[in-house]
Amino acid sequence: MERSLEPFRGVFTQQEAIPDDAIAAAVDVMRTGRLHRYNTVGDELGAASELERAFADYQGTRFCLACASGGYAMSIALRAAGVEPGDTVLTNSFTLAPVPGAIASVGARPAFVEITEDLVLDPDDLKTKISETGAKVLLLSSMRGHLCDMEALVALLADNDVLLVEDCAHTMGASWNGRASGSFGLAGCFSTQTYKHLNSGEGGLLTSDDPQFMARAIMLSGSYMLYRRHGAAPPETTFEDIRLETPNMSGRMDNLRAAILLPQLQTLDKNVQRWNERYDLIADGLSEVPAIKLPRRPDPEHYVGSSIQFRLPTLDPEKMLRFVELNKEMGVELKWFGDNTPVAFTSNHHSWKYTDPQELPKTDHILASLFDMRIPLSFTLGDCAHIARIIGHNASRCTSEENLR
């Protein structure tokens, strides 16, 4: 094997260490013994409330709720938006299992919308599905950080009286034409799970400018009658009736995780730049391989390149699996969305048996050749160049073998 193509030795699941100031903040909270978000004294603002205020400021929104996970944020967002059992909720056909899972958790049914080769919602199919289903809510998954034309989407939904809830698990720090992802609809749902853009192991954030919606979400999250202790909540009068009408479905974030997140938020934009340096380097390398097709990144999109996706449309399924194995042998961990068997976090709509089977030929064609790779900030730029060479080498090898058949 050529020296330049020695196996890669990095670990794709290795995140950067939690920064020292976040560790110190967590230790300070542990020393108080008051980890529960409502275990405060007097007018003291706990770390969870501080995080809500800081993230609302970062997003440019009025209200924010810190909760247990991104999936939980989606679930209570749908409930607070008025979704009821038996309702149909539109969502992307290309997403991860927590998105249809959030819809199922409120007793609703997902209706999947086809995607384009740029891995975003197909507006023509969205129009069709709105007409066919009569759905009044779209749970938009900006899957793997790919933003659709958000202005066109908002206009389409407004014309059809459809509410927008944004799943921003992969777009925290991203924007469209300078407007933050998560601020285009009724609500934005964010994750702080280990592999996302802020890391507290598990955690979620829910944002909105709608006071009634956020009051319901806060009560759903398990605030009891302690809603006054939130850092970015609606006025107290908003809760007058909502506090008695809304069930408690406990899913709060604690002060320990919030303390870990607050210092990370201060460096998020810097880390977005670092991710994009790595993404762009890998994308530039892969773009030189004729067999590889990369999704287009439109000019209005300010993305966060914490992962990369590409297609090898000329390979058959057997060669797709061989491509994954060749890269694995050389230390590069890829996921294939066309695999019929779910692997780790990766699955497609065919394996979500709790949803109604749906015909999605365009999506299936795209996913059949789609590969996905995580880009942790623990990788250097040199690492990323090495990875791109390995992927390119194996892509050329597999396509050459395919052409010889």
Image (cartoon, rainbow, N blue to C red):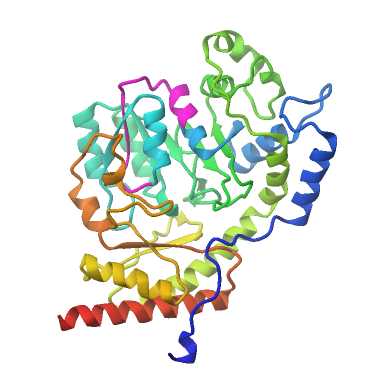
Query: From the viewer's perspective, is residue 250 above or below residue 207?
Result: above
Depth order, front residue of 294/75: 75
Decide if residue 105 is on the left or right side of residue 277: left
Where does residue 188 sit, x and y in percent of width and height? 50, 37
Q: Residue at x 46, y 85 (%)?
A: 5
Quadrant occupied by the N terminus: bottom left
Q: Position of residue 241 (x, y in %)?
A: 56, 8
Left or right of 133 in this view: 60: right
Residue at left offset 32%, top offset 76%: 395
Q: Is residue 250 magenta?
A: no
The residue located at (61%, 50%) in the rendering is 198
Q: Position of residue 389 (x, y in %)?
A: 43, 80
Quick one: quadrant of the C terminus? bottom left
In this view, the residue farthest toward the left is 405
Q: Tag count in the figure?
A: 0
Residue 285 seen in render: no
Can you see residue 45?
yes
- 42 relative position to 375: left or right: right
Q: Which residue corresponds to the image point at 58% horizontal and 19% vertical from the top-left?
A: 219
Tell me if residue 87 is in the magenta stretch: yes
x and y percentages locating residue 104 in the rendered image? 37, 30
Magenta segment: 75-95
Near-viewer residue (161 or 218): 218
Picture quadrant where residue 261 is located? top right
Vertically, is 196 above or below 140? below
| Image quadrant where residue 329 sits | bottom left
Q: Quadrant of residue 129?
A: top left
